[in-house]
């Protein structure tokens, strides 16, 4: 059994109780996967991703607004997080690319949390918002590496 499968099952169970949207997906070589979300103006958007399987564990990332303005981009990143306030109402695009790889598929977890514009009585802090996103991302990364280590140990035993 692949060491990634137990990680995916655990993450799916953990994300069921989370307020953030968690996606687990695969990106084929020479391709890109994009997700689109409608975001209201002045909403706070927090996102995080971790590459948990495949090659050098890296992907290209780009987040664009409804007017195709680039909000966040990165090349060959293993994990990352970003946050921004929506500058206009519309469809925002979150893309993950594996175009640099000609043979290896990548497995990625992606968490997206969209909060409506805060009200004056809103006491949620930036630290509170990122707590769950960071924990899920780091947990995915740590569990995957632990399963890799255990799989390698089992293969070395006679």
Image (spheres, grey):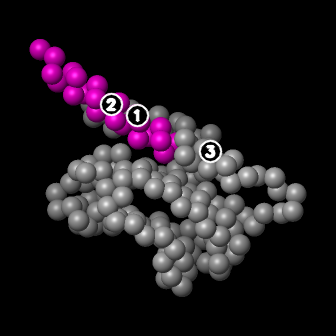
Q: Which mark is residue 28?
A: none
Quarter holding residue 148 = top left
Sequence order check, earlier mark of 1 and 3: 3
Q: Looking at the rendered structure, which numbered label has been put on residue 131? A: 3
Q: Is residue 51 above or below residue 60?
A: above
Residue at the spot of label 1:
143
Residue 146 position in % (x across, y down): 35, 30
Rendering coords of residue 65 (x, y %): 54, 77
Residue at the extreme bottom of the image, as rendered: 67
Q: What's the CA distance linking mark 2 and mark 3?
A: 24 Å
Q: Answer left or right for 87 relative to 62.
A: right
- Regarding residue 5, the answer to whether it shows in the image is no
Quadrant in which the C terminus is drawn: top left
Q: In whole angstroms, how far apart are the C-alphas of marks 1 and 3?
A: 18 Å
Residue extending furthest toward the right: 121
Callout 3: SS: helix
Q: Is residue 139 magenta?
A: yes
Between the residue at mark 1 and the residue at mark 2, the CA separation in whole angstroms equals 6 Å
Relative to 15, say whether 44 is above or below: below
Residue 147 image label: 2
Mark 1 touching mark 2, by CB under 8 A?
Answer: yes
Q: Quadrant of the N terminus?
A: top left
**Residue 116 rendering spot, x and y as whole percentages:** 73, 64
* Residue drawn 36% across the image and 53% down it: 78
Image: 23 above or below 114: above
Instruction: Work out whether 146 lies above or below 105.
Output: above
Q: Which residues are magenta?
A: 136-158
User: If you read the primary sequence from the N terminus, does the residue marked by circle 2 or circle 3 appear first?
Assistant: 3
Q: Is residue 148 magenta?
A: yes
Residue 150, percent from left and from top: 28, 25
Residue for point 30% across, 50% down: 57
Whether residues under marks 2 and 3 lie with C-beta atoms below 8 angstroms apart, the answer is no
């Amino acid at each position: 059994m692949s060491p990634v499968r137990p990680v995916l099952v655990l993450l799916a169970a953990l994300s069921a109780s989370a307020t953030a949207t968690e996606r687990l997906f695969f990106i084929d070589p020479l391709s890109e996967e994009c997700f689109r979300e409608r975001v209201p103006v002045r909403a706070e958007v927090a996102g995080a991703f971790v590459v948990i399987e495949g090659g050098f564990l890296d992907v290209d990332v780009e987040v664009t607004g409804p007017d195709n303005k680039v909000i966040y981009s990165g090349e060959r990143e293993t994990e990352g997080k970003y946050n921004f306030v929506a500058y206009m109402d519309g469809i925002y695009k979150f893309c993950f690319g594996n175009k640099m790889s000609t043979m290896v598929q990548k497995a990625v977890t992606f968490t997206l949390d969209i909060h409506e514009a805060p009200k004056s009585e809103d006491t949620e802090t930036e630290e509170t918002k990122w707590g769950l996103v960071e924990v899920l991302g780091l947990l995915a990364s740590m569990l995957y590496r632990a399963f890799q280590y255990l799989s390698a140990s089992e293969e070395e035993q006679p």
